[in-house]
Image (spheres, rainbow, N blue to C red):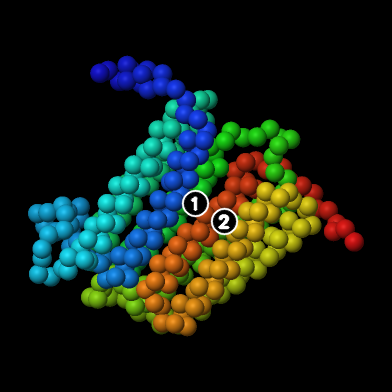
Amino acid sequence: MPLETLKARIDALPTPSTRVQRAVAIAVVVTQALIAVTGSVVRVTGSGLGCSTWPQCQPGSLVPVSHPEFAALNQWIEFGNRLLTGVVGIVAFAAFALAYLARPRRARYLRLALAMPVGVVVQAVLGGLTVRFDLLWWTVAVHFLVSAVMVWLAVMLVDAVDPEPAATERVRVPSALPGLLTGSVVVLVGLLVAGTMVTGAGPHAGDPETPRLAIPVETLAHVHAAFLFVYLGMLLAAGVLLRVGGSDRALWRRYGALVAVVVAQGALGFVQFWTGVPELLVSLHVLGAMAVVAATSALWCATRDRAAVAAPAQPVPA
């Protein structure tokens, strides 16, 4: 079939409903976060090299097989994570297809939707390189950080499903808030990077033979905690701006959700440190990290991506 004919037939398909587009976009957020969590399960169970090669599981076999050096459970845990990547890819492609069919076609929405399947391909390649490099800590760190970026973009995709509101409908925000949030995002990046370094020096390498980052875990944990305290301080400052600026309830809800997940994530991190980094808490901490990224992105979207109207600072009523 000629490409022109195929394109014409695709363009003739009906426009999907906004509800369907939003549901699939939310599914992208969930699956992108879930693949990071299952990756942590692979790591804490020592299954990172359960499949010794990539894209095959074992040489000559795409699926797990009986092997004297690799336990069946470890193989299936790693293979299950690879299968989930396929699910993530299907959902990501569905989001792009819906964005392409949406009318009128919007460039920003389409770019964000296209980033989803492209990101899955990039992550699949990074996962293969992680295996090829025998789970070196920095390859695992890059793999995780790209997942964080994908979750951020997926939340932006959800926000982009709806067309831009009219100027009279845009959320009013204090004029200083976007700049403060930009700084907080920089601190969040440092927080995530420090967290990957703590993991790189910690006990859960994904395989007993994998070399660890040669820096004391305690030192890295204190650096990680310092970033957390700075981030919390900036969130408190953002709350003051919201209070003074008289922002609406929608913005307050996003801010409240962000503060809640950051506090919960920080508490979980301290419990991890005090209890010797148990496996279950590691995976919960990864889930919390994805929640913090998603909540930060949601607040960012409310103040930036929807072209929010700057509200002048107002004095607090006596």
User: Which element is circle 1 on?
Assistant: helix
Residue 16 coordinates in the image, percent (x, y): 47, 29
Foreground pick, 215 / 110: 110
Task: State the residue position of label 1.
Answer: 152
Q: Is residue 314 above or below residue 221?
A: above
In the displayed structure image, the side of residue 2 where residue 113 appears, left or right: right
In the displayed structure image, the side of residue 187 where residue 208 appears, left or right: left
Which kind of residue does numbered mark 2 sit on? Thr
Query: Is label 2 in contact with label 1 (beta carbons under 8 Å)?
Result: yes
In the displayed structure image, the side of residue 227 where residue 2 appears, left or right: left
Residue for point 27% across, 51% down: 83
Q: Is residue 251 above or below residue 20?
A: below
The residues bearing labels 2 and 1 have C-alpha atoms spaced at a distance of: 8 Å
In the displayed structure image, the side of residue 309 where residue 55 appears, left or right: left
Q: Quadrant of residue 282?
A: bottom left
Quarter in which the C terminus is drawn:
bottom right
Foreground pick, 71 / 164: 71
Quarter in which the N terminus is drawn:
top left
Task: State the residue position of label 2.
Answer: 296
